[in-house]
Image: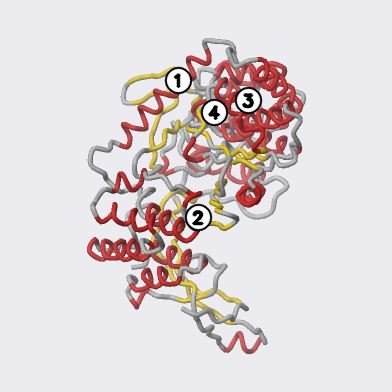
Amino acid sequence: MWNSRVPKPERIRLLSELVSHFGSFGPLSAQFAGLYSSGNLAALIAAPVPYGDVSVRDAIGARQVQALFSKDEDLVLPGVDKEGVAFSKFLETEAKCCAVNSRPIGDGGGSHVYSVLHGAERKIHSILGPAVALAAFSFAFGPGATTSVKAAEACFKTKLSARLACSTNLEPYVADFLSEVPHLTAHHSTSGSHPEAGPPQKDTWTVPVDVTNGRLQFVPKTALTHRSIVVEPHLNGFFQKGVGSYLKRRLLRAGVNLFDQSRNQRLARDGSIGGHLATVDLSSASDSISSGLVLDLLWKSDAWFELLDALRTPVVDYRGSSYRLEKFSSMGNAFTFELESMIFYALAVCACEHLGLTTENVSVYGDDIIIPVQAVGLLYDVLEACGFTVNAAKSFYSGPFRESCGTDWLDGIDIRPHFFRRTLRYSDLFTAHNAFVRSHEFEAAKICCDAIPPHLRLWGPDGYGDGHLIGTYSLRTNREIRRRGWGGGLFDTYQLRPRKLKTLYPGDWLLPTYSVYVRSGLDGPTDTETVRGTAGVERVSIYTLASTVFCR
């Protein structure tokens, strides 16, 4: 079966062959391969790469040896409690946010830091613009779990029917927010709930809404630690997503495109070649955005602060205990990504302006920041004064290496490895084979191919996913194709069948209205019943004109 697990003996043999292959690329690669051979995976994963002292080929090999294990979610290392490490990090960032909240922002940073912060306040005010009515937002449910819906059942069907819940911050304003979605409100009201029965009088509606805390959870991140997220109350997530989408559009008007990472990737490449641009990465960036910092930077836009504060979740539960958050918002909040991007962009731009540098090449995507090298020192001071911690292992302002948004550049060459992120399945070997083919590592691709049973191997062109192997293939044709005079043909590929909830739910009558609401102005259907997971594998035929023959 294409998506079944590779047997353990075959998996060990495959990894050993890949380590042996990439370990031959140079001295550092051989050193990393030696750590694997000695069973010291923790040291292998944590080992730094001195990019300025190794060849490109050696760096590629060393990085790939690490990548076989560094993000393996199922890898269990002796003495490593992934959730415990992540929870300790959560408490550490909370303590740091508390320290920031207890003092004036920028205290002790000097006049240059205060100047940048003052400029950032004005910059954020100009990005946000004046306060807008709730009708300007397009609220929507996201794909993940809420406190009312489990992740395994998360889809529009279940979320429209689930019991409404909100945080303590949202409770005083929930009636105003619910007035923007009258059909949802009517469905959950205790009287006159269906519009076909005639519109009920507003003062007769009783809409039960539970007031609840968020739920702190941990999800896989690397082989050494998990990542903390917060499962938001049902209504918080719904309204947060609308605000996040609006902020994304406002940032786009200011020149920050959160719909596309390619600008950051291009500038990172330029920085690796010319050395004039730095890439800055932060540790636990979203967990370090303190409430005091947001209040200080948004005080000129107090209506916006009140809106964001109303939608945040101030208390989370974890293993029977409750924790009042010192951070403003966490991963799981649907506007955290846009909020942190706006804050880091404002700080980076104003740091450059304070130094009289051009802001032409300033770019931000989440906590991936790109700035001129001359501004690095000041930006570091500002970030530290705001309670952030620069990730020194992933920030680069000297030497030939830069990384940003999933690309790693060494002297202008992308040396990004292919990561094995879970216990290997045959489908992962298809993906790895194709990744190695695209990076011209044909021997590594052959190692992956040889580990796939011959009866599972399908071949086809690039550009159609990883359900088949990229390589020499033959298109097949049929009478219908020939009769129509089509010049292409068919090839086969595997794909996962999505899992769908076919159960009827009380809120299903809302699906047409909700679909029109969230897809307004866009083309394409709204998927209302697909949930996390898979319903199996199918082999499908795809028509293509791509008839190029690849060598394998």
Q: Residues within 10 Å of mark 3 (few under 14, many from 20)?
A: some
Of the two numbered discs 4 and 3 on the same chain, state the one appearing first in sequence: 3
In this orientation, does residue 90 appear?
Answer: yes
Of the two numbered discs 1 and 3 on the same chain, state the one appearing first in sequence: 3
- Quarter of the picture holding the N terminus: bottom left
- The residue sitting at 73% across, 24% down in the picture is 125
Toward the viewer: 475 or 397? 397
Of the two numbered discs 4 and 1 on the same chain, state the one appearing first in sequence: 4
Q: Residues within 10 Å of mark 4 (few under 14, many from 20)?
A: many
User: Judging from the image, what secondary structure is the residue with disc 2 in?
Assistant: loop
**Residue that numbered label 2 is attached to:** 416
Of the two numbered discs 4 and 2 on the same chain, state the one appearing first in sequence: 4
User: Judging from the image, what secondary structure is the residue with disc 1 in?
Assistant: strand
In this orientation, does residue 190 appear?
Answer: no
**Residue that numbered label 3 is attached to:** 177
Q: Nearer the viewer, mark 1 or mark 3?
A: 1
**Residue that numbered label 1 is attached to:** 315
Contact flag, marks 3 and 2 (Cβ < 8 Å): no
Classify 454 as above or below 194: below
| Residue 241 spot, x, y in % from top left | 59, 35
Q: Amino acid at mark 2?
A: Arg
As measured in the structure, the alpha-carbon distance from the residue carrying label 1 to the one carrying label 3 is 21 Å
Toward the viewer: 50 or 142? 50
| Residue 326 spot, x, y in % from top left | 48, 18
As measured in the structure, the alpha-carbon distance from the residue carrying label 4 to the one carrying label 1 is 13 Å
